[in-house]
Image (spheres, rainbow, N blue to C red):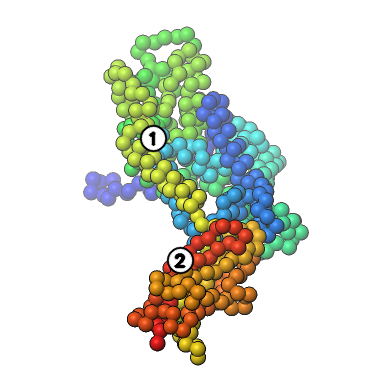
Amino acid sequence: MSSTDPVEPPPLYAAREPIFPRRVKGQFRSLKWILMSLMLGFYYITPWIRWDRGPELPNQAVLMDLANRRFFFFMIEIWPHEFYFVAGLLIMAGLGLFLFTSALGRVWCGYACPQTVWTDLFILVERWVEGDRNARIRLLRQNWNAEKIRKRITKWVLWLLIGVATGGAWVFYFTDAPTLLNNLIHGTASSVAYITITVAALITFAFGGFAREQICIYACPWPRIQAAMMDEDTITIAYREWRGEPRGKLKKGEHDPTQGDCIDCMACFNVCPMGIDIRDGQQLECITCGLCIDACNEVMDKIGKPRGLIGYMALKDETNEKAGNPVVNVWKHILRPRTIMYFTLWGAIGVGLVAALFMRSPIDFNITPNRDPLYVVEPSGAIRNIYTLRLRNKAGEATAFKVTVVAPDGVNQNAMSVVLEGQQGDTVTVPADETMTQRLYIMAAPGSVPATSDRTEMRVWISDAATTDRVSTDTVFNGKAK
């Protein structure tokens, strides 16, 4: 090829090579097992937790009731107009990601991301059916025979069952779980439920069984974004090159002053679920799961070398260690202006949401004056205004609400009266956990309102007839005395 020939750019997408992580034991692998068990347990069990809210409300502890546009979380109920709670939680989740990434790198990706959790589960099943790393590699390379077909079908069936359980658990969050399960078994559930479970099952099967690290590398935007959250003080996984190089073979008890501690055993590479070699430096694919640390520590124990050839550290630490300077305390890496700012914002939003939650009024209503006509003058000279009243009952039982009007200054209180269409007097009963729209008439006795203005400010109160709870809003009364 001549020097003038154009150089082909490298491909943007590399064909996937199957990765078969080797089983490893250690503190980080144990931590991942614990977190995986807790998160999967929470996901699958939560829809079955019951919570007594009264006879007329759902008794599922966590329920996204889309049909009635409500969200239940144990003792908390979120209505559509309170979506700011959900928005606040989403903002807190984003700031939490920024905080943890800035302090500890991609710990979310390595320990708590759903893709990581379900991939770990699928690898566990794969290892149980086909064996550890070497056995799985041999099975991949061998020709199709009865053994390979049996193991592959067994593995795929178990993966599909996990996928179906995952999709089933997902739909259980949107309706009563026991009722839906019974309908699913008897074939009487809605087609939406079956379609949702099927789609979720296939996505779980494909992502956890086949795509795996490809999702993290190509589909997920977070590896690119997280680079902006990290600096030289961020704690991440690194290889102590100054200690490990040059590499060479060593046996336990041997010592070669010209050789580093790394014996090039490839243990760190063989356990990596992303298929990378941490000794090559920081890489986009690394999810900082810590499995390479466990593998390396195990090897260091066998050859009698100190642990920590691979470990969690800040990039600044490696430079200090290589120069023989003291290593900065880990809390000085974590508690720095950037992380403190993220935590302050995160905490402020959390405190604001909690305060707003406890300051919520038990009664919710709004009142809108009708514009056509603005008012009606009765033959007696009384003036009548018509309003649309929307009352929301947040209680778990039917509640009677009383409507009263506080007359403005200069107007006799007894001159103002309230009538609710279709109701007895000034009281209306709203069913449990429902919103009622009610036509409201407010009457002013002849000559009672000022003659100088067409608009008179007044206040409408709504009170719970059985308790002392009450709320108010200001509105206007149209019309003036003749």
At x 45% / y 66%, what residue is drawn? 473
Amino acid type, callout 1? Ala
| Callout 2 secondary element | strand
Tell me which residue sits at (47%, 18%) in the image. 300
If you read the primary sequence from the N terminus, does the residue marked by circle 1 or circle 2 appear first?
Answer: 1
In the rendered structure, the answer to whether residue 328 lies left or right of residue 93 reads left
Label 1 and label 2: CA atoms lie apart by 47 Å
Q: Is residue 308 left or right of residue 187?
A: left
Question: In terms of depth relative to the viewer, which is nearer, 199 or 439?
Answer: 439
- Percent coordinates x, y for residue 164 in the rendering: 65, 51
**Mark 2 — residue?**
473
Q: Which residue is mark 1?
A: 103
Q: Is residue 300 visible?
A: yes
Note whether 415 is above or below 255 in the view shown: below
- In terms of secondary structure, where does tag 1 sit? helix
Q: Disc number at residue 430?
A: none
Relative vertical location of residue 266 with respect to residue 4 in this rendering, above or below: above
Observer-nearest residue: 437 or 460?
460
Cβ atoms at labels 1 and 2 below 8 Å apart: no
The reply to whether residue 15 is visible in this rendering is: no
